Image (cartoon, grey):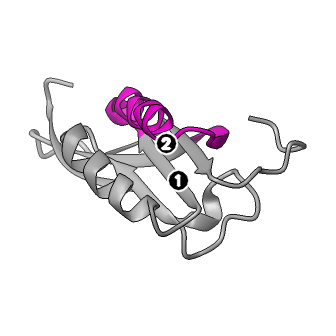
Amino acid sequence: MENYSKGSNEEEPWDLTKVPIPNIPDDIIWMKVSPGAKMRNVLEFALKDFQDKDLILWSGSGPALTKTISCAEIMKNKCRNLHQISAICYRKVTEYWDPLIDALDQLKVTREIPTIHILLSKQPLDTTIPG
């Protein structure tokens, strides 16, 4: 790889229809946690919005996986009697590597990044759904 420099990245966009949890309404609070997000800020926003709604979906991928789980667990501690469904899947990230030598072609590398979705609800959820 010494003959290549890292070019651009294309991440698969977040899409509610690709979340592997069935029957999620469109008006849900969807917290997409990034690796650089401050947990205090994310949780403040989520707790404030969750007072008016019944469902919140926490999502994170790659380096934000553990932060996503931590946010959901803290929320479960602050708001008692929540019901949970978790799902794990993968998001595609395509990396382009540009050649440093003219004789070489550009490389395209597609990676699948682990992703977690945690649905928390004030109302009981379908117990037949795994997770």
The residue positioned farthest toward the bottom in the image shown? 27
On screen, residue 84 versus residue 5, left or right, reads: right
Give the magenta range: 61-89
Spatial CA distance of label 1 from label 2 is 14 Å
Nearest the camera: 51 or 4?
51
Regarding residue 106, the answer to whether it shows in the image is: no
> Up-down: is 4 above or below 16?
above
**Residue drawn at (40%, 32%) of the image:** 74
Residue 102 in percent (x, y) is at: 12, 46
Label 1 residue SS: strand
Instruction: Tell me the tag on residue 57.
Output: 1
Nearest the camera: 96 or 42?
42
Whether the residues at callouts 1 and 2 have beta carbons within 8 Å, the answer is no
On screen, residue 94 versus residue 73, left or right, reads: left
Residue 44 lies in the magenta-colored region: no
Q: Of callouts 1 and 2, which one flags the residue occurring earlier in the amino acid sequence?
A: 1
Q: Quadrant of residue 37?
A: top left
Q: Please name the amino acid that badge 1 sits on.
A: Leu
**Residue drawn at (63%, 52%) of the image:** 121
Instruction: Tell me the tag on residue 94.
Output: none
**Residue drawn at (21%, 25%) of the image:** 1
Residue 75 in percent (x, y) is at: 44, 39
Instruction: Tell me the tag on residue 79.
Output: 2
Q: Please name the amino acid that badge 2 sits on.
A: Cys
Label 2 residue SS: loop
Mark toward the viewer: 1 or 2: 2
> Up-down: is 69 above or below 23?
above
